[in-house]
Image (cartoon, rainbow, N blue to C red):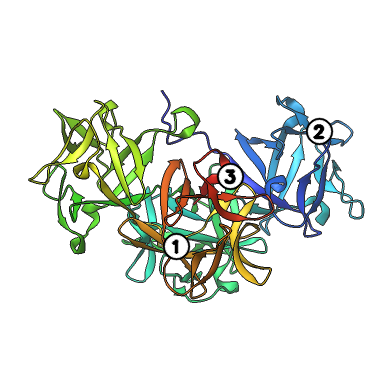
Amino acid sequence: MSDPFNPKLTWKVGLIASNGKYLTTDTFGDRINATGVDMKKKQIFTVDPHGDSVLLIAPNNKFVEAGQKGELKAALTTSNADCVWNIEALDDGRWAFKSKYGYYLGYKDKEEEVHSFGRACDADTEKWTVHLAVHPQVCIRNNNRSSYMHLENGVLNVNEVIPWGNDALINIGYHKGKYSLQASNGKYLKHTGDLVDAVSEDTVYVLVINGDNVAFKATNGKYLQSTGSAGKVFAKSSEITKNELFSLEDSHPQVTLVNAGKLVTWKQGNDVKAIVAENEKTDTEIWQMEIDRAAANGQGRWSLRNNKGGYLTIKEGLMFTSETQTRDENSWLEVEWLGSQVAFKAHNGKYVSRQPNGSLKAMAGAVDDTCKFIFNLDNRPQLVMRSEFGYCGVKNVQSKNLIQCNVPSGEVFELEVKDGQYALKAGGAYAKLESDGSVSMSGGSPEWFYIELLVHTKIAVKAAATGKYITAEQTGGFKASANKVEGLNQLWEY
């Protein structure tokens, strides 16, 4: 069976024409135009690599097809030879799309209707700026070193085999066709390798997509690479080799678990116990949660991994970490969400419970206090959320600063955590639940929410005061209004 954690990679992108507008599918019919003002659902295309060529899938989940005379439409549910495109990466970072008939994807400047009959690709109307539609918080792996970028001693180094803790979380910012890399301390990577406080020409990069990988080209014409024993990241090379290629990967949630005031750890050896004081947390008390994406609808069971790559598993009812980086059926746990706490049900149908000596056993037939673990999300000190309608940001609506879920770029919220409860903060104010269920950024003190991990890369958010789940509304509403998670409207990419 293929590894459910490494599916075939596709790129979600918005394509910006030289008129500054996004490639867009019509609401009715199969026409494509360059008319989108922002990158929302109708502007996100999928680039599906196949060898040296790609398939281009429109937001209506149909393939973009170029005819022999340059006609263009997105009508096919099954691809054919006319759906195959070659991408030509231009020196300024833009892309050109060439059909099998040798024509380039372009648009008529006045009508904004897109076609495919340009021969030379010498006009701006046939060059497309790429706006990645990936969630902006990622882990970045360097191919040459087989290691991840993280904040270390005030710089970004590539020397972590497993991206661990919030220092390995990188925010990718978009700036009019170029990208910045923001470390977990809020500072931006300058092409010299220094981290600075603000975005400038020296901190933005042209993104060059090379198959499953990317390279970052600085304004000095050099590409980012990692160099030296620590793998410090800065722009050094004028060409792309394996050392200049990086992969962007989802950041798995990393958590701490507390029962009876003690952190769950494996520091004493392979056996797993809840014995460490909360103020003594190290990497051995942090667990990476990985969902079984092969399960129905992407939901279901989870595995827990330690900072050396070993998975938590069960042997004769006792919990311990495996010495190999592989899973078996005893590695999977069902998670029950209990507000600020969670309970784990093992493969044997029993709940994991803490014993008097701190050991963990899968032996309880029902959930009691020994089975309830305070759940703290450790590697999201900053949170960017996206709904199916757009990113979450703060907008002034009827004289209130409300969180809305349909803005083109995401607000970076500070996430405060206390005993399994979470508060959002931005601009010096806290998220506050209003009487109609909407959420304003007007609180002077923390107001608490619960977070549930339900689907790969997505969370549900519940207001602690009312027990209602936050729901995304097409008009932009961000409201605590649902009694349960019923679909995509209650799930937030994070």
Tell me the residue at 85%/49% (across/down): 107
Asked whether residue 323 appears in the rendered view, the answer is no
- The residue pinned by badge 1 equals 382
- The residue pinned by badge 2 equals 101
- Please state if 349 lies on the left or on the right of 34 as rendered: left
- Please state if 355 lies on the left or on the right of 107 as rendered: left
Residue 137 vs residue 414, the one in the foreground = 414
Q: CA distance from mark 1 to mark 3?
A: 22 Å
Q: How many marks?
A: 3
Q: Nearer the viewer, mark 3 or mark 2?
A: 3
Residue 57 vs residue 237, the one in the foreground = 57
Q: Secondary structure at mark 3?
A: helix
The reply to whether dot 1 and dot 3 touch (C-beta < 8 Å) is no
Q: Earlier in the sequence, mark 2 or mark 1?
A: 2
- The residue pinned by badge 3 equals 489
Q: Amino acid at mark 3?
A: Asn
Q: Secondary structure at mark 2?
A: loop
User: Mark 1: few, some, or many residues within 10 Å (few <14, many ≥20)?
Assistant: many
Q: Amino acid at mark 1?
A: Gln
